[in-house]
Image (cartoon, rainbow, N blue to C red):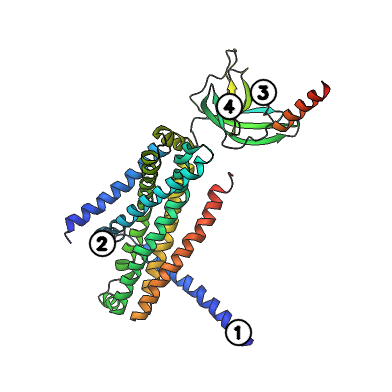
Amino acid sequence: MINLIADLGSGLLGKLVRIGQALLMLLQATIVRPKASSFSRLIQQLYAVGVQSLIIILVSALFIGMVLGLQGYTLLAAYGTEQAVGQMVALTLVRELSPVVAALLFAGRAGSALTAEIGLMKATEQLASLEMFGVDPLHRIVAPRFWAGIISLPLLVAIFSLVGIYGGHLVAVDWLGVYSGSYWGNMQQAVDFNGDVLNGMVKALVFAFLISWTAVYQGYTCVPTSQGISAATTRTVVYSSLAILGFDFILTALMFGGTV
Amino acid sequence: MNKRWLELSVGLMMVAGVAALVALALQVSGGNMSRNAQSYAISALFENAAGLGPKAKVTMAGVTVGEVVSVAIDPNALMAVVNMEIYGQVDYLSIDSSASILTAGLLGEKYVGLTVGAEEEVLVDGDVIEDTQSALVLEELIGQFLLNFGDN
C-alpha cells in the first residue's frame, strides 16, 4: 500500500520534472538572437517539414472536401436545402477539420521525422560532438526545427481549407449539380473572416506549437538506442495527437462555445 | 539537393500559404469582417424578441446593414432591448425609422428589418428606436385563431 502511494508520487513527480525540462529546453532553444547563418538552416527545415508535407496535405484535403460535399449533399437534399452545402463544407473545414486533420497528418509526417532525426543524432553522438566544438545543439539543431514547424503548419492549414472547399465544389457543383452561385453565396454569407478563418488559424498555431515542442523534446531526451528512438517517435505521434484533440475541444469551447 | 531548388520550393510554399489565406478572405468569407471599425450602435425596444439572438442580421429593404449585438431585458420598461451595430456607411436612417422582427422563410432564422421614416434628422450612436413590431410567435397566433374560431 505504502509502496503504491510512493510509486504514484514519484511517477507524478517524474512527469512534472519532464514538463519542466521540456519548458526549459524550449526557452533555451528559442530565446536567442538569431544569427545570419541560422536563416539558411531555417529554410532547410522549412523544406523538410513544410514542403515535403504538402503532397499529403493536398491529397487528403481534396478527398475530405469531396466526402464533405457528398455527405452534405445527401443529407441536405433530404430537406430540399442542398444549396447550403457550400456553407456546411466551408464552416466544417475552416473551423474544425482543416486545423485538426492537417495537424494530425503533420504530427505523423513531420513530427515523427523530427524526433527520429534528432534521436539518431543523439544516438550517434553528433549532439555531443557539437557541444565539444562549443556549439549549442539547442540553438543549432532544435531551434530551426521548432520554428519551421510553427511557420509551416498555419500555411498548410490555409492551403488545406482552400483545397477542401474546392474539393467540395467539385462534387457538389460539378457532379451533383448544385448551382455554383448558391454554393459560393451561402458560404460567403455564413463564413466570417475574423470569427471563423482567423480562429482556425489560431488553432493551427497552437497545434503547431504542441507538435513541434513534443517532437523536438522527445527526440532530444530519447534513450539513445534503436528501441529508445522508436519509442520516442511513437510517443511523439501519440502525445501530439492526444494534445491536438484535447486542445481542439478547449479552443472550440472558447471560440465558438459562447455564440451558440 | 540543389540549394536553389530548395529555397525556391520553400518560397513557393510560403506564397501558396499566404495566397490561400487571401483566397479564404475574399472568396470564402466574401470579405465579411465582423467588427466594422466605423459602425455605430443603436437599440430598439420590443414587446417580444423571441428567437432573436446575437449575430442576427439587421436589414433595410432586404439588404444587410448591420447585426444584432445582444438582446437583454430593460428592467424599467419590462421590454426586450435589442442592441444593434449598424455599418458606418449607412448614415441615413431617419429618427422616426421603425424596426420589426421578421422571419426568413417559414422556419428560417429571425432578423431585424428597418423601415426608414420621413424625418430629416438621422439616428446616431446610442439612439433608441421606439416604433417597433414584435416577433411573430406561432403559438400565440394559433391560440388567437382558435379563440376567434370558437367565438364564431
Q: Is residue B131 left or right of residue A254?
A: right
Q: Secondary structure at mark 3?
A: strand
Q: Which residue is mark 3?
A: B132
Whether tag 2 and tag 3 are in contact, CB under 8 A, the answer is no
- Choose between A184 and A47: the one closer to the eye: A184
- Name the amino acid type tagged 1: Leu
Please tell me whether mark 3 or mark 4 is closer to you in this view. Answer: 3
Q: Nearer the viewer, residue B130 or A260?
A: A260
Q: Circle 1 marks a residue in which chain? A: A
Residue farthest to the right, as pictured: B151
Q: Position of residue B39 (x, y in %)?
A: 52, 30
Name which residue type carries label 2: Arg
Rendered residue at 37%/57% (across/down): A150
The residue that disc 1 covers is A4
Residue sitting nearer the eye, A134 or A155: A155
* Camera-nearest label, 1 or 2: 1
What residue appears at the point 34 percent right and 63 percent down from the top-left corner?
A109
**Image coords of residue A156 (percent x, y):** 35, 52
The mark nearer the N terminus, 3 or 4, is 4
Badge 4 amino acid? Asp
Check disc 1 and report its element: helix, strand or loop: helix
Amino acid type, residue under disc 3 in the picture? Thr
Q: Secondary structure at mark 4?
A: loop
Residue B30, visible in the rendered structure: no
Percent coordinates x, y for residue B124 in the rendering: 58, 23
Quadrant into which the N terminus of chain A falls:
bottom right
Distance between the Cα atoms at labels 1 and 3? 70 Å
Residue A41 to residue A190: above or below: below
In this rendering, is residue A149 above or below B59? below
- Residues indicated by labels 4 and 2 sit on the same polypeptide chain: no
> Can you identify the residue that label 2 sits on?
A41
Asked if residue A218 is positioned above or below residue B57 in the image, the reply reads: below
